[in-house]
Amino acid sequence: MSLDDAYVLPIAAPCEWLRSNDRRHFHAAAAITKKWRETTAWRARQARLPHIDAPVHITAVIHRADRRKADAPNSWPSVKAAIDGLVDAGVLTDDDDAHVLSTTFQPGEIVHGSQLTLIIRPEKEPRA
């Protein structure tokens, strides 16, 4: 899907969210990370997102399932796994600083279950 020179990829949460302040065992965190990464790669292939040569700006829209107090950037570990999934799917060459120029977070609408929407905007002009 493309929208105004951006690619929009909604991803229904495949499992629980990883949070920056989680204190879970690394084996449990690794299993959740793998699920987010694999699900994002699968969704990117399913959506037929093209390979993007230009550096990108990514906005992560965090859609919660309820109205409890939340902190969208606290979902960074899940978003990082999702961005790794974009690399796995061949949408991005890499997720280093030369390829991903910025990652921003915003809260989204409440949805059944929960969802991450990645908005991928290619850089229009070369950086000096």
Image: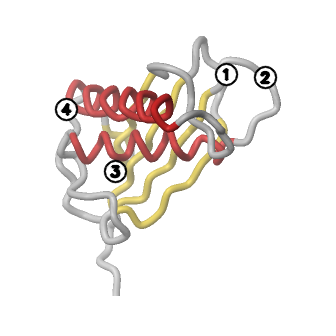
Residue found at x 29% / y 77%: 126
Of helix, strand and loop, which one carries label 4? loop
Q: Mark 2 points at which residue?
A: 67
Neighbour tally class for label 3: few under 14, some 14-19, many 20 plus, Cα within 10 Å = few
Q: Position of residue 69 (x, y in %)?
A: 82, 32
Q: Residue 110 carries which label?
A: 1
How far is mark 1 from mark 2, CA to CA? 7 Å
Q: Where is residue 39 in the image (x, y as percent from the top left)?
A: 33, 26
What amino acid does circle 1 point to?
Answer: Ile
Identify residue type, mark 4.
Arg
Do the numbered discs 1 and 2 sit on residues whose CB atoms are within 8 Å?
yes
Q: Earlier in the sequence, mark 1 or mark 2?
A: 2
Question: To which residue does mark 4 refer?
Answer: 48
Instruction: Report the mark closest to the observer, 2 or 4.
Output: 2
Secondary structure at badge 1 equals loop
Q: Which of disc 2 and disc 3 is earlier in sequence?
A: 3
Question: Secondary structure under badge 3?
Answer: loop
Q: Residue at x 33, y 46 (%)?
A: 84
What residue is rendered at 31% in x and 65% in y?
99
**Residue position for label 3:** 5
Query: Where does residue 60 sit, x and y in percent of width and height?
Result: 52, 44
Task: Specify few, some or many for label 2: CA neighbours under 10 Å numbering under 14, 14-19, or 20 or more.
Answer: few
